[in-house]
Image (cartoon, grey):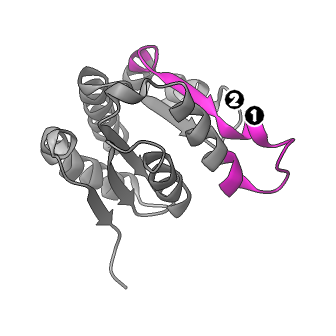
Amino acid sequence: NKLSKLEESVEKILKLATQLGQTYIITNAEGGWVEYSSQLYIPKVYNVLSKLKIISARETYEKIYPGNPNEWKNQAFALTGEKLDESTITNIVVLGDSKIEMEAGVNLSKMYSTARIKTAKFRESPSPNELNNQLKLVLAKFEEIVSSLKNWTIRLEKQV
């Protein structure tokens, strides 16, 4: 079953991320959507979500920046960064399928002189199998990515 394979990969990467540092999900979806959809379709992932913070950028910023999802995400990343202890910031790792979160992560990293930014840009609208393969590629190198003293940019998009 493709969904159960995908569930396993998402669960593994989230568990590893929470072991390696503070982990957040910042989404432009409505508040509660991540929890609801994971509970419905990938319950093993739902169980992991309690160990991390889920932020709905839409819920927080849509009224301030109507019709501007880029700014919702950018502001949510910045707000998250403001809550972190600057002396402990070494890595900002961003996994996502849009340029919006990659840019928001880079902007956040500029707030901290010691931060290293690591981004992995997934393909937009992949099949479950494609997404699973992308997650497996990142998972295989995730500890190396996080522990590296360099900035990383990974693009897992299909070449046209």
- Name the residue located 32 percent from the left edge and 58 percent from the top edge: 130
Q: Tell me which numbered mark, 1 or 2, is placed earlier along the sequence.
A: 2
Q: Residue type at mark 2? A: Gly
Q: Which residue is mark 1?
A: 59
Magenta residues, start to end: 47-72
Q: Position of residue 33 (x, y in %)?
A: 64, 31
Residue 53 within the magenta-colored segment of the rendering: yes
Q: Give me the C-alpha separation between circle 1 and circle 2.
A: 6 Å
Quarter of the image with the N terminus is: top left
Q: Is residue 8 above or below residue 122?
A: above
Q: Which residue is mark 2?
A: 31
Q: Is residue 100 above or below residue 45?
A: below
Left or right of 84: which side holds 143?
left
Q: Position of residue 8 (x, y in %)?
A: 28, 32
Q: For residue 12, which quarter of the picture?
A: top left
Label 2: how many Cα within 10 Å (few below 14, some 14–19, many 20+) = some
Q: For residue 9, which quarter of the picture?
A: top left
Judged from the image, the secondary structure of the residue bearing numbered disc 1 is helix
Residue 150 within the magenta-colored segment of the rendering: no
Judged from the image, the secondary structure of the residue bearing numbered disc 2 is loop
Camera-side mark, 1 or 2: 1
